[in-house]
Image: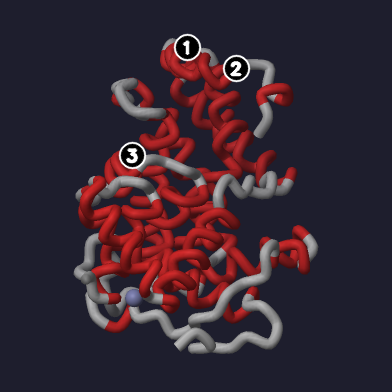
Amino acid sequence: MLTCRQFLDELSDYLDEKTDPDLRSKLEQHISDCPNCWVICDTTKKTIRIYKGMDPYPIPADMHARLMTALEHKMAKKG
Amino acid sequence: MSAMSSPIEIDDEAAIVARARLGDAKAFSELLRRYEGKIFRLALHITQNREDAEDVLQEAFLKAYEHLDQFQGQSKFYTWIVRIAVNQALMKLRKRKSDRSVSLDETIDTGEDTVAREIAAWDENPEQRYSREELNQILSSAVDDLAPIYRAVFVLRDVDELSTEETAEALNLSVPAVKSRLLRARLQLRDKLTRQFKRKGEDAFAYM
Ligand SMILES: [Zn+2]
């Protein structure tokens, strides 16, 4: 059986579904036997889900305006 | 970002870049409009300073404009401009912390930082306890607590949803380096968020 340490080392690949089937079944065996790693796995999955695809706030209008002005200067120079 | 809000479809990006390379100012402005928010967020996470992040945003787009002919078009435009922005952001960090060098590829301690300290189940949808604004505050301050070497990897990989390979390319890191940083970032964030989101009445080690 895998140790908790070995399980944690593979957790990212496991959640990204990048592990080969043999390792995957060992990891699944571990979480069904180890409640702590099950909780860590479940809450890490939720952590990833909660961040995924978070749209950035639009930058403030004045910041966008300064960026456009700087770019226009640059474009004028480049010709 | 929905396709409806944009006059140009996402798939047309190669065409927009090609037009920008021919000197079409409108095409370049479209690229800028598309990515300024993401570049600013990334710069803010790395520098943790609004002024610096705005400088990085400007420098990145001006440099991209200047060197557009060097963009090969084999990678995404976003990956390419991230690489420019990250370099600028690291230069800012080094200036601020002039006593020690800051690098994304410094070796990481493989010991303590993956140890899970908070082990408790979460509510089913803990995010619903908070307003969108509060939630954003919680999530971004948790990222800001990470070491700089983890922040950029996490934002690109798990927030912007670049692939591991694209993240490696954008940050000039190897694929294994991206993976080990991502694992540590995810585990540390899980630890921090568990303190916020754990089910009421449950506490650390409740499952032991
Ligand atoms: Zn375990």
Which is more toward the observer, B78 or B66?
Answer: B78
* Residue position marked by numbered label 3 in the rendering: B166
Mark 2 residue element: loop
- Identify which amino acid the numbered label 2 is placed on: Glu
- Identify which amino acid the numbered label 1 is placed on: Ala
**B144 up-or-down from B8: above or below:** below
**A75 up-or-down from B208: above or below:** above
The image quarter in which residue B90 lies: bottom left
Which is more toward the observer, B25 or B33?
Answer: B33
Mark 1 residue element: helix
- Identify which amino acid the numbered label 3 is placed on: Glu
Q: Chain of mark 3?
A: B
Q: Chain of mark 1?
A: B
Pick whichever of labels 1 and 3 is earlier in the sequence. 1
Pick whichever of labels 2 and 3 is earlier in the sequence. 2
x and y, in percent, of residue B52 in the image:
51, 60
* Residue position marked by numbered label 1 in the rendering: B15
* Residue position marked by numbered label 2 in the rendering: B9
Q: From the viewer's perspective, is B187 left or right of B102? A: right
Q: Residues within 10 Å of mark 2 (few under 14, many from 20)?
A: few
Q: Nearer the viewer, mark 1 or mark 3?
A: 3
Pick whichever of labels 1 and 2 is earlier in the sequence. 2
